[in-house]
Image (tube, rainbow, N blue to C red):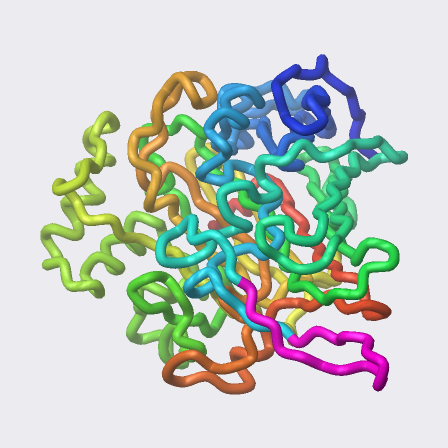
Amino acid sequence: MSAKISELPPVSISTAPTDSPVRIFQLDLNNITVELSSLGASITKILLPNYNEDDIRGNCDRDDVVLAYASPKEQFEDKNSVFFGAIVGRVANRIQGGTFQLHQIEQTSDGPMERLETYQLEKNNCPNHLHGGFDGFSNRNWTAVVVDDTVQFTLISPHGDQGYPGGVEVKAAYSLRERQHGHGSRGAQLHLSMCADLLPGETRATPISLAQHSYFNLASHSSPERILNHVLEMPNCHTFTPVDQTSIPTREVLPVGNETYDVVSAMDFREGKTMADALVKYGEEIGLDPLTAKCNVNRILNDATQRFEPGNVAIYGFDHNYVINQEKLSIESGLHVAAILHHNPTGRSLCVSTTAPGVQLYSSNYLNGMDPSLCKDCCSYSRWQGLCLETQTYPDSITLERRSCGGGEEFDNGKCFILRPGGETYSHKVMFEFSAMDKHL
């Protein structure tokens, strides 16, 4: 069974150069509601039942489990600086120094000639380029059309857009469907298919890597406990790509822990642990004494109004790319399981599966008390309020040379996709499966 799709009243904002209204779509299935916006091809709302309270008729309270702006107007005016719920690109994640090199083919009187070109992008995450710059795909008003059970968003990015070469057409298609194999009416699967091609007649190659940047909190987007009581499992992620002080990968690929599981590092989610425990361990591993690391977490659990202010608590948390084991497929979907998130008090579970080689785990470290007038339900989102699970190619993986220590074929396995004239279409699929938790978890 497919979801019921409704179009809500459009929102008029000045989105130069078209000034087209932002279109809003609502998808409903099995007591789950997903709201989509053409601004950034964004997920702006996901309402989930409390599976610990629903009765046989499915009657229960529902909570909105994604962080978002109050409306498209606030998102546009703030330029979606935190990338809430959006498709980010032209290249997701960071590019070192905002620069990359790419081989281009030039037609000359002597025939095709290859040349190595250098491109300079905006440094919107100083000293690096992040998610397409200050004016990336995340704050563009995409065109939208409903095709059968799917809402499809399309964006044209011309040559020179964001500093990238070549013109491209990008599409992001969302559909909400029944879970497979007799799971009944408890839960649903949100499918997202992203693809891109060069525009007709385009002769320049360009890098492309799209990601869905939703911040999830299965308790509620406004939960005072933030994500600390969530349990995260990453059973297919045995390695990760460590980063330098500016969050650029060193091009090493390291194990998250040892094979005997007797010493569990902060990076190791193979068997699952609470985000509270993970962040305490992370604090210890970056040099905080154990008492301070524990207090930083406990005071949020004990005082919902506690904010981290500059000079109060150093910014830290997860912002790392994990390598997804490509040998293990989900039997039902044919995708690779990237992560499973649980929230015991509500019985909610989210499983993220994908065709991508990596997933960026981001614990919203840089949210620091946003202006409540900008945010949904007048919330003031702070650190660790949401968890991003951004499936992707590896960060800073365009340029051919290895820029630092380590490196090798393992890192190259996650390299950024390059669209070339006459070449393959870029394709990236993600499935977000929402369900009731297994009782034994």
Report the magenta residues as a range.
103-119
Q: Which is nearer the eye, 143 or 278?
A: 143
Residue extending farthest front: 109
Instruction: Please name the residue shown 53% across and 67% down the image.
Output: 394
Identify whether 191 is placed above or below 396: above
Query: Quadrant location of residue 91?
Result: bottom right
Identify whether 217 is placed above or below 282: above
Q: Which is nearer the eye, 375 or 98?
A: 98
Q: Which is nearer the eye, 156 or 383?
A: 156
Instruction: Please name the residue shown 58% across and 47% down the image.
Output: 88
Whether the magenta-drawn stretch holds residue 116 is answered as yes
Residue 81 image point, x, y percent: 45, 37
Any part of residue 36 in sight: no
Q: Quadrant of the N terminus?
A: top right
Residue extending farthest right: 148
Identify whether 321 is placed above or below 363: below
Residue 371 image point, x, y percent: 35, 23
Whether the magenta-drawn stretch holds residue 118 is answered as yes
Any part of residue 73 in sight: yes
Instruction: Please name the residue shown 81% across and 81% down the image.
Output: 112
